[in-house]
Image: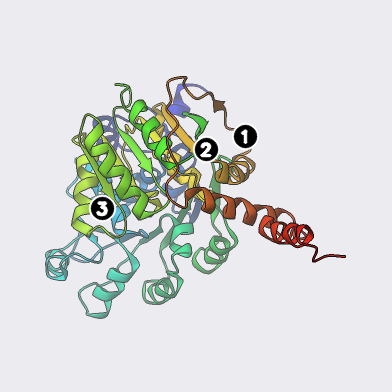
Amino acid sequence: MGTEERDFKSLGVTRQFINAMEDMGYEEPTEIQKKAIPRVLSGNDLIGIAQTGTGKTAAFVVPVLQRLKFAKGVVPRAIIMEPTKELAIQTESMVRQLMTYTDLRVVVLYGGAGLKSQREALEVGTDIIVATPGRMMELYHTGYLVVQKLEVLVLDEADRLMDMGFMHQLRPILEVIPVKRQNLLFSASFSAKVEELSHEFLEYPTRVEVSPQSSTAETIDQRIYRIPNFKTKLFFLEQLLGDEEMERVLVFCRTKDRADRVFRYLERKVEGEVRVIHSNKGQNTRINAFKAFQEGEVRVLVATDVSARGIDVAKVSHVVNLDIPRTIVDYTHRIGRTGRAKHHGVAISFSDPSEKYFVKLIEELIGMEIPVFDNPEEMQIMDFLPRELREMEIEIDRQKQLRDPNYKGAFHDRKNSKKKRFGHES
């Protein structure tokens, strides 16, 4: 039970991949790597349940590359399926780094980019493909993608693939690829949909799981501040960003409009470059902003949940939830952007009165209370936006109705009290 367990060599990883991982800063295997790498190398079908930031991408990329060994032929022998183009780009980047000391070739396929260049790359030849389902099927149907020699198929972020409705695209893929292949499925959670997919996709799989589903990484320091409204949140965020320790910061907002407002405010007020990404931004804008953030040129990246699982940067120092997510599992995806690869991270959440309900649900999900920090004395309480207070009241009323089906609502009570005051009730 000593050093051997923590050593990549003892897991069966060969020297050229150990060298590549050392170049990337991997000192010892993470838990998911310890459990998955030997099993994938043995040729088993595998289900890997691991939260973000646990090193799961390397857990399947390393053994898949090792299985392929060297460049061979023109058509791909392995395909890694990703739900979004951002994730496809990131995974392809990791594949490239891990195959540095080999002659293996990789091609990335995703929608929104030129078909011509992707077709040309396939014609030159590749050993491994990283793809989104839609673009992969598009190239398959036009005859540019040949899958007859496929040996390994990986479905990464399977829960997200299912949530985004890719099942109808996955089934035709499963029908056309060779039956004799190794299948790997990785997911942050093992939901009913993912379980259904695993029955359809895997044959006698080994299942490995490194932490309770929907938990948060131990390397993340979580905290909450109770803040009354949007303008005060903005003011406090500006104060926090005055701290030099906040080197590379991701700020999550609930809507595109709020993200744009935060971006415009921070661009004027804080040191260092600020960018914003959300679904209204063009693909190139999003990719360029992400790359600049990854390379340290951008200090603050403001995003909506469309990017919560699409960002993999080793040294995000802080994640700030300007708004508490209404889809509570998004909380773990958001804060999982920090504390990655064993680095320490800080996740700070701002909660207004209408968000306390969602904080409680998140705490139930992650199995812990998030510490509430006192607001600093110098915090300035700002005015509410027009209609903001009214919208909060409506939201709080909706939450009460969710908790108690018999609750008729504050607005119903007010109407009745008016009737009583004007003698409408006996």
- State how far apart marks 3 and 1 are (Cα): 34 Å
Of badges 2 and 3, the one in the foreground is 2
Residue 297 versus residue 256 in the image, above or below: above
Q: Is residue 74 left or right of residue 217?
A: left
Of badges 3 and 1, the one in the foreground is 1
- State how far apart marks 2 and 1 are (Cα): 10 Å
- Element type at mark 2: loop
Residue 49 disc label: none
Q: Is residue 8 visible?
A: no
Residue 5 versus residue 100 in the image, above or below: above
Residue 89 disc label: 3
Q: Is residue 276 visible?
A: yes
The amino acid type found where label 2 is placed reads Thr
User: What is the quadrant of residue 11 in the picture?
Assistant: top left
Q: Which residue is mark 1?
A: 368
Q: Residues within 10 Å of mark 2 (few under 14, many from 20)?
A: many
The amino acid type found where label 3 is placed reads Ile
Residue depicted at 43% across the width and 65% down the height:
164
Upstream in the sequence, badge 3 or badge 1?
3
Q: Which residue is mark 2?
A: 216
Q: Give the x, y percent position of residue 263.
A: 28, 43
